[in-house]
Image (cartoon, rainbow, N blue to C red):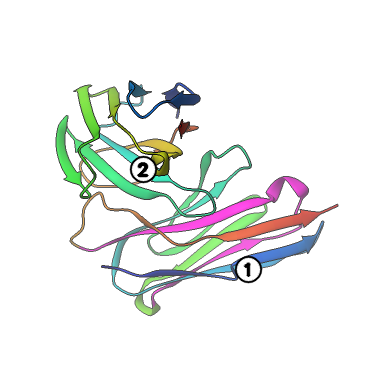
Amino acid sequence: GIQVEQSPPDLILQEGANSTLRCNFSDSVNNLQWFHQNPWGQLINLFYIPSGTKQNGRLSATTVATERYSLLYISSSQTTDSGVYFCAVESQGSSYKLIFGSGTRLLVRP
Amino acid sequence: DTEVTQTPKHLVMGMTNKKSLKCEQHMGHRAMYWYKQKAKKPPELMFVYSYEKLSINESVPSRFSPECPNSSLLNLHLHALQPEDSALYLCASSLGQYTGELFFGEGSRLTVL
């Protein structure tokens, strides 16, 4: 099956810093989403981005499908950005099977 | 309204108990999902219902029994669970014709004693 690798596994930032999270995947994809899991466990949609670039406030994401990677940019980080960021992908021909990477655990210090 | 509601939020059960987890969405979505998440691990897909039919069962043990009574509701019936089944159980939904964007509930945290 498709492999999804996220880096870095852990990241500590000072409030106000910028960061880039990476997701590499091993096969062509129909679907790629970025989620933020808050300390209470809820998975919150950040982006649905199988290709291209999107921005939402301080967050933006880019997926280069031909090179099999996606990037999540966080600018001017805040303590509320802390949590785990997951990339999830669905390979072509595998409807409804969204597979999660191992995540990047982010801690933003005040 | 982009909300998926799961009940109960927390559940403690013994290995001989029978319990159920419930999930509800009113977004008109026709695909619904159960994921299991152990501590410090990513969510793992268990079951998918598409248009009220079971589409995917990821070789889940029969002590977990899913049910989709209608397009808005998804249940997970639990029976004779093991302590290693303790986890966060996440329900999600999506539009239906294809996977599209998944929306997750807050999860049900299950402890098996």
> Callout 2, which amino acid?
Tyr
Q: Is residue B71 above or below residue B102?
A: above
What type is the residue that disc 1 sits on?
Thr
Q: Nearer the viewer, residue B92 or A73?
A: B92
Residue drawn at (35%, 26%) of the image: B27
The residue at which mark 1 appears reads as A20
Report the span colored magenta.
A68-92
Residue A37 picture location, percent across and down = 56, 46
Decide: is A102 above or below B66: below
Whether residue A17 is visible here, answered yes or no, is yes
Q: How many marks?
A: 2
Q: Is residue A77 above or below residue B7?
A: below
Q: Magenta stretch: residue B28 in it?
A: no
Q: Outermost residue, bottom direction? A: A67
Q: Quadrant of residue A65?
A: bottom left
The secondary structure type at the circle numbered 2 is: strand
Residue A44 in percent (x, y) is at 52, 42
Q: Position of residue A88 (x, y in %)?
A: 41, 57
Which chain is home to disc 2? B
| In this rendering, position of residue B66 left or right of residue A11 | left
Q: Which residue is mark 2?
A: B35
What residue is rendered at 82% in x and 56% in y?
A: A15
Report whether residue A55 is seen.
no
The Cα–Cα distance between marks 1 and 2, rounded to whole angstroms, is 27 Å
